[in-house]
Amino acid sequence: MEKYLIGIDAGTSMVKSVVFDDEGNELAVGRQKTTVLNPRPNWDEQDMLEVWEAVVITVNEAVAKSGVPAKDICAIGVTGQGDGCWLIDEEGEPVRPAILWSDGRAGDLIARWQAEGISENAYKILGSALFPGVQAAIIKWLDENEPETLAKSRRALYCKDWLKYKLTGEITTDETDGCVPHFDIAKRQYSEELLKMYGTVKYRYLLPPVKTPLENYAPLTDEAASLLGLPSGIPVVGGPFDVIATATGVGAIHPGDACSIIGTTCFNEVVMDGPYIEPLNVGFTMCHGFAGLWVRAMGVMMGTPNLDWILAQVGRTYEEEAAKRNMSFYDVVEEHVKGLDIGAGGIIYHPYLSASGERAPFVKPTARAQFFGITATHNRDNLVRAVYEGVGFAMMDCYQYIPIKINRVRISGGGAQSAFWCQLLSDMTGLPLEVPEGSEFGAKGTALVAGVVVGLYENIEEAVKKTVRLERQYQPDMEKTKRARAFYTLYRRLYEHVWDDWDLLQDILMQRF
């Protein structure tokens, strides 16, 4: 009898459930959008029950589309957005809407921790830079601004932990989610010293028990099984969280393997055989999903949304041309911009669109996106090209701070669908890039972990060998790489020069005239 796996990936704005066969083929996908709430400027929240309902809808949709008999589903893997704070009470109900990784309300708190040396001291234990969306900052902000919320709370979870709880009734987290911001990263366990630094020792009880992803499973409850139309009792695995699950799903499981996710974020990560944290005070050092492995990562807050934004401003004529020529919108856009040299005719773009600032390779809550070098000779093609390149410069910036020999870079996310962008990123970074077959790599990664748990694969190495195949490869043009490196020097100097000006802008905006 054939066996199948379900991978659930609860992203920031979309929940996806995918049915996989044992060779890693995506048989069917269910998708459901979820709402990011913005009750105040710089606040990003989510209705926890809406996310759970989206899981129920998408699992049912994916299984129905696949045609796979429910009895042949042998395990479920759950992954989701990382960081943030998903609070539940004694009854296991949401205390308030989840506060997301992208939320900026704790920006002033992070600035205070930086000024007081707390961030720097924490980094020596944690190996990761603190930013407004980490759980410790959110808990401390709630302590100072919503203490009644914490008084009602039993546990502080992450997205995938909340969903695993709804599926199994078990409250846990895994090493990949739990490590930032509460771990002694070398020991892979909670650090009481960090809690003292953050001033959150009295909320120690909120932190759930930690397991490795291969240990973090429990049986699907009768109630959840009834909602999903699946057999009760099958294992539900929680983790790894989305970026680590994606690394697993594209096959980045050995030291030196790299993975870049060109999606909502521009997330760049390299697998390591030790908890290496240098250079200090930049980026993140996290647990991989497997013993003896860590990940060094730099996650730019926004990736493809930069392109969405610029095309929303100047894309009308591209749309009209695409309709007239019966072509894809993005094919028309890329036809226009691919003829321009790296440097976009002298325009530099910094892709710091997030209202909560930037977190990699530097933490700056007031950082903002900006164009530099525009003249009357430039047009929309130059601006759009500069935005494509801006994400590439951010990717270069991240890998600059990951001093580890890279074997290969696997690319995923919406940006990986663009052959033009993939080649541009290879040219800019000077790195060979590989695009695996498939599209839902976060769901795939957590499904593979679930497959190991139930014995479908002997170990994760066998799972990757059996299920990960390459679709496309790109080699860099080193002459273009030289040009990109020259502009990258300017890219960095520019944001260093306006560092304090970002703060001044924030101060002016906060004033009442």
Image (cartoon, rainbow, N blue to C red):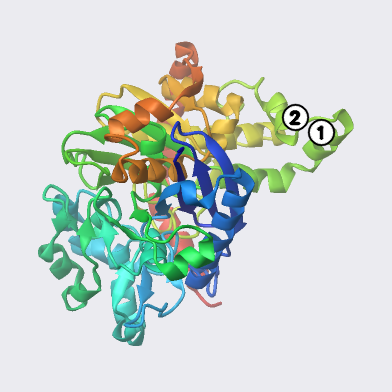
Q: Is residue 392 above or below residue 153?
A: above
Mark 2: secondary structure = helix
| Picture coordinates of residue 507, whole percent (x, y) | 45, 67
Residue receiving disc 2: 332
**Cα distance between the residues tagged 2 and 1:** 6 Å
Image check: 444 left or right of 388? left
Identify the disc placed on residue 191: none
The number of discs equals 2
Q: Nearer the viewer, residue 202 or 402?
A: 202
| Pointer 2 with pointer 1, Cβ within 8 A | yes
| Residue closer to the observer: 268 or 377 | 268
Spot the residue most to the right: 324
Q: Which residue is mark 1?
A: 322
Residue found at x 40% / y 21%: 431
Q: Nearer the viewer, residue 393 or 454?
A: 454
Residue 44 in view of the camera: no
For the C terminus, which image quadrant?
bottom right
Splitting the image into 4 quarters, where does residue 148 fall? bottom left
Report the quarter where the N terminus lies.
Answer: top left
What is the secondary structure assignment of the residue under circle 1?
helix
Give the percent coordinates (x, y) of residue 484: 47, 23
Kindly identify the residue that appears in the image at 49 percent across and 18 percent down. 473
Instruction: Specify the quadrant of the image occupied by residue 59.
Output: bottom right
The disc labelled 1 sits on which kind of residue? Ala
Please name the residue shown 26% across and 29% down the image.
254
Crowd band around label 1 with a 10 angstrom C-alpha radius: few (<14), some (14–19), many (20+): some
Badge 2 crowding class, 10 Å Cα cut-off, few under 14, some 14 to 19, many 20 or more, is some
Q: Is residue 35 left or right of residue 204?
A: right
Across and down, in percent, residue 306 comes to 57, 45
Q: Amino acid at mark 2?
A: Val
